Image (cartoon, rainbow, N blue to C red):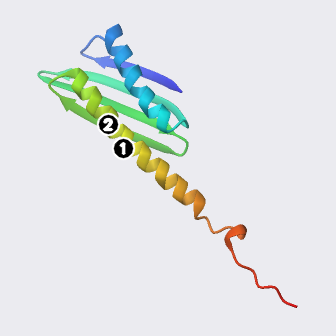
Amino acid sequence: MNLNLTGNHVEITPAMRDYVLSKIERITRHFDNIIDINVILSVDKLKQKAEATVNLRGKEIFVEADGLDMYASIDSLVDKLDRQILKYKEKNIDRRDNQGGLKDQEFEQSE
């Protein structure tokens, strides 16, 4: 998994980088087929904004969160991202289980 962390109008401090990494670990515990994650932290006047784009196999998930504090924005972002990845994982498992292949069909035996 590759993690790209970018700052717009904000300097990414080592503390911010460590905080984002520790929060992203929670997502990788739930789902380990993540190709890469792009996180953008930005500041617009009083609004602290965090955006993330997660590339999965066959899917791209985009999430954004904003608030008055950058750490609160990161927390909100990771919570939203966690919910969306779990939803994708559940859909993927349901799709894989209910494909209707030959092993699921009942055959009549003729004598």
Residue drawn at 51 percent across, 40 percent down: 56
Q: Is residue 33 left or right of residue 11?
A: right
Relative to 24, say whether 30 is above or below.
below
Q: Residue at x 58, y 64 (%)?
A: 98
Give whichever of 75, 39 is nearer the camera.
75
Give the quarter of the image for residue 77.
Answer: top left
Marks 1/2: CA–CA distance:
6 Å
Q: Is 24 positioned to the left or the right of 46 in the image?
A: right
The residue that mark 2 highlights is 79
The numbered mark at residue 60 is: none
Specify few, some or many for label 1: CA neighbours under 10 Å numbering under 14, 14-19, or 20 or more.
few
What kind of residue is marked 1?
Arg
Q: Secondary structure at mark 1?
A: helix
Coordinates of residue 24 in the picture (x, y in percent): 41, 27
Which image quarter: residue 14? Answer: top left
From the top left corner, tell me how far across and down residue 6 is, in percent: 36, 19
In the visual, does 93 lie left or right of 49?
right
Q: Which residue is mark 1?
A: 83
Horizontal arrangement in the rendering, residue 103 relative to residue 25 (left or right): right
Instruction: Residue 79: give x, y in percent of width and height.
Output: 32, 36
Towards the viewer: 86 or 47: 86
* Residue farthest to the bottom, as pictured: 111
Are the residues at dot 1 and dot 2 in contact (C-beta closer than 8 Å)? yes
